[in-house]
Image (cartoon, grey):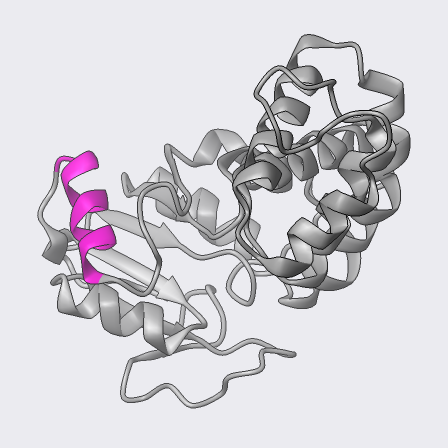
Amino acid sequence: MNFPPNIQHVLLDIEGTTCPVNFVSDTLFPYANNHLLPFLEQHRFETPIRTLIAEIQAAWKEDSSPEAQALARSIQKNRDFAASSDQAELTPEDACLYLQWLIQQDRKLTPLKDLQGMIWEEGYQHGQLVAPLFSDVPSALKRWHREGLTLSVYSSGSIQAQKLLYSYSNVGDLSHLLSNWFDTRTGPKNEAASYRSIAQQLRTQPEQIAFISDSPSELRAAHSAGIDAFFSRRPGNPVLHAEGFPIVESFSEA
């Protein structure tokens, strides 16, 4: 596809846009879930993991959900889990109880996302995970980069997870083609303010950005911010109605 001449930046979603929407749900999430406990047990004494466990413990203590508190009470043994900030550190087994509950509730706790990213990194490095980019994506990224367009990613997955996906793709490392990475720390993807913030961080005007996503709510938010929005219609995507946005079925040139 070719963009209008005013476009200087291409902002890309990932799931359903540059890789199949089910890669995350059917491959990445199950892989992380299956490796939560072994990973925590193997690395529990390393500083980054101890910090994550402390953050998980603090979040659990402050979680007002009756189910979360009932789960906490179930692991109270000889210590008072909720009483003080200097309580004994959670064991990997205890931490996994809360993490698995968060996953079942589809709760996006930052320490959980960070932990998943660490697990995925090991999986990618060991060749157990490979990101299946759509066949037209690599050549398009290279062409856009060669033409001087600045390429960026905006995904609900963590920045670490985004970089891993493009570093360990089915065609090798493409991460060097991408200049900027944005996740939900920038803001919710269905709010216009998030896209205005991205434009400011890119030091450009919204009308100089093209955003491609399979989510109409994201496209509406980007459009409200003044960004040129394009609807990604890929095989397997759950949403097929473009709601009036230009449809992109392939990144290949017409």
Classify residue 200 as left or right of residue 85: left
Classify residue 33 as left or right of residue 145: right
Classify residue 183 as left or right of residue 209: right
- The picture quadrant where one finds residue 219 is bottom left
Q: Is residue 8 magenta?
A: no
Query: How far across and down, in percent of the image, does residue 1 sit?
Result: 37, 66
Which quadrant of the rendered structure holds the C terminus? bottom left
Please give the name of the residue rendered at 74% of the width and 10% of the height, measured from the top-left corner.
46
Query: How far across and down, in percent of the image, does residue 69 sit?
Result: 66, 50
Q: Main secondary structure of the magenta part?
A: helix
Front one among 139 and 15: 15
Taking 157 as reference, is 224 above or below it? Answer: below
- The picture quadrant where one finds residue 235 is bottom right
The reply to whether residue 132 is in sight is: no
Query: How far across and down, in percent of the image, does residue 60 sit?
Result: 61, 40
Classify residue 169 as left or right of residue 45: left
Residues in magenta? 192-203
Please give the name of the residue rendered at 65% of the width and 63% of the height, measured from the top-left corner.
105
Taking 52 as reference, is 2 above or below it? Answer: below
Front one among 63 and 6: 63
Taking 111 as reference, is 91 above or below it? Answer: above
Q: Is residue 199 magenta?
A: yes
Please give the name of the residue rendered at 42% of the width and 44% of the height, measured from the top-left corner.
183
Front one among 121 and 113: 113
